[in-house]
Amino acid sequence: MTSQTDYANSAAGSGAGHAGIVSLLATLIRLVRASGESGKLLWLVAALVMVVAATAYAQIRLNAWNEPFYDAINSRDIAAFGFELGVYAMIAGTLLVLNVSQTWLNLMMKLKLREILTRDLFQQWLAPRRAFMIANAGPIGVNPDQRIHEDARHFTELSTDLGVGLFQATLLLVSFIGVLWSLSSGVSFTFEGSSFVVPGYMVWSALLYAGLASLASWRVGRPLVNLNAERYARESDMRFSLVRVNQNCDGVAVYRGEAQERGRLDVEFNRLLDVVRRLVGATTRLAWVTAGYGWFTIVAPVIVAAPAYFAGNLTFGGLLMAVGAFTQVQQSLRWFVDNANPIADWKATLLRVSEFRQALIDIDRTEQDARRIEIAETDSRIVLDDVNVLLPPGRSSLSVRRVAISPGERVVIVGGPSSGKTSLFRALAGLWPWGTGHVELPAEDVMFMPKHPYLPGGSLRDVLAYPYPPEKFSDADFYAALNAMGLPHLVSALDTAAPWEKELSDPEQQGLAFARLLLHGPRWVVIDTAIDTLSPQTRRALFDALRKELPQTSVLAISGVENKYDFFDRLIRLSLRLENDGAEGLSATSV
């Protein structure tokens, strides 16, 4: 049998992680088109294209300005010198406006891309049952917050910077190649008494110079892709460990476990440091290429243009114009050299985001085999027909083959320790599909109550109404639900926002969850051992409220207490049969 972990690992291995970059980018483009925000993004792209094109034209004009300006200096022509200063002021002012406009458009592009990608990841991650499934799906489901928050932010920012930079470099390259070609045409070289002309020799020199540097940086910078991806994973693990200690600091302090927690943090930090050290080495090796290229670039344009100047084909101003044009061409060509590290970083984040998104989609495409519990919708009852839940040590099964629960009927399923109670609850909720048998559940008005209550952020009114808006219920409804569960002291705090999972005691949190049940008044309720955690007084108050306020509500409770209580009509036992048949591959930590 294939477990969630096995499946997700195989999906990740054969999905986004090994897909081509072009394929991944095509997927992201389809995502943008389907987001409904493509129109706004298209306007931003069009505006950026126009601004970058105008900037390139202004830079061509600025480069051409070099010749008359420095020729005026060389000839000591004060009138021409003053005129060219005025021309410079106009060009520089235009470039200033264009640069500010490009900065604003660049930032807005990052914002819009992040909005589109993050909202899509929200939608994919919080599709029904996916967050639970991916959390139990092995490494791909570890720390989804890192991939949704940090990786998505970093990827969209790098995509914008690299995309705009590449377009700008390409546009400047096309623009200045023509200038450089015309400046280097007709220059003759003499070798052993023979003269020859290399048309556009400055262009070929720039291409060769930048090409060699790009090849060297690509060869040296290749390891950075995997190292950056590994670093992000280790950073995510480190942050998770810190958050875990912070959230459980009271338990750590009570048990005097600071030394053990520090040891665990040291282990995680050492793993991170190991990756960072390797990353430092790879980045340093790349710096030899990029920095060396940058320093030689200071004199390279002058060296290349010198033959034309000494041959008399260029004036001093023309020499500086040629140097400027050569610098623009080689800077455009060295775009890969300058961005080798960011490109490796971008590819690593692209793979992490795409891998996570693809795993979320693929998790819905698990193979439907004979060993999966079938769940069907019905209107009038809950039916468990020959249900067996597969677990790592064997299978969990009921003492009767068929259980049918009619409206208003209350049934308790009792199981001992490690009998698979929570796994049965998850199977009924559609979260744990591995097993056999058939389940029928009403299509609407069913409430599932997990063992540990979930208290969302917001006010107590938001907590009780969850997942509905508070406006759906009246103040009297809220008061009645809290009073029924012995929580009248919380009535005054209904509109107070606080981290209630820390403010309330465990019994109060559980009581609040059952107050939510009374407030919603569903027709069908499935409860996972939560009743066992209530005090006898609170449990009695709950049963009385259910009899009085929800007499037609059917209750299927799962319990670990060998006590039928006088509330339930029937008791069914749950037991675990130890066997290996059909349980291969299941992770014990997932149960």
Image (tube, rainbow, N blue to C red):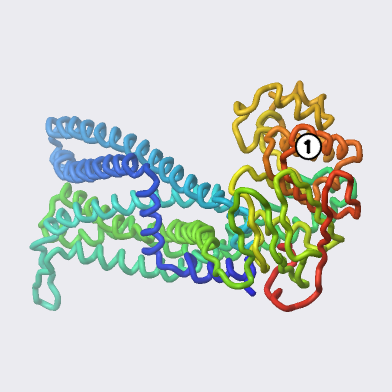
What count of labels does the image hold? 1
Q: Position of residue 393 (x, y in %)?
A: 78, 72
State the quadrant of the N terminus.
bottom right
On screen, residue 579 versus residue 88, left or right, reads right
Q: Is residue 245 left or right of residue 219?
A: right
At horizontal 64% and vertical 69% (from top left) the residue drawn is 3
Left or right: 35 with respect to 86?
right
Q: Quadrant of residue 426?
A: bottom right
Taking depth in this image into account, of 312 and 40 the one nearest to the observer is 40
Residue in the foreground of this view, choosing between 240 and 365 = 365
Mark 1, Cα crowd under 10 Å, few <14 / some 14-19 / many 20+, is: many
From the viewer's side, name the closer residue of 208 and 479. Answer: 479
Q: Position of residue 293 (x, y in %)?
A: 38, 61
User: In the picture, residue 235 is in which quadrant?
Assistant: bottom right
State which quadrant residue 141 falls in.
bottom right
**Residue 146 image offset from top left, x and y in percent:** 59, 51
Toward the viewer: 472 or 543? 543
Residue pointed to by mark 1: 546
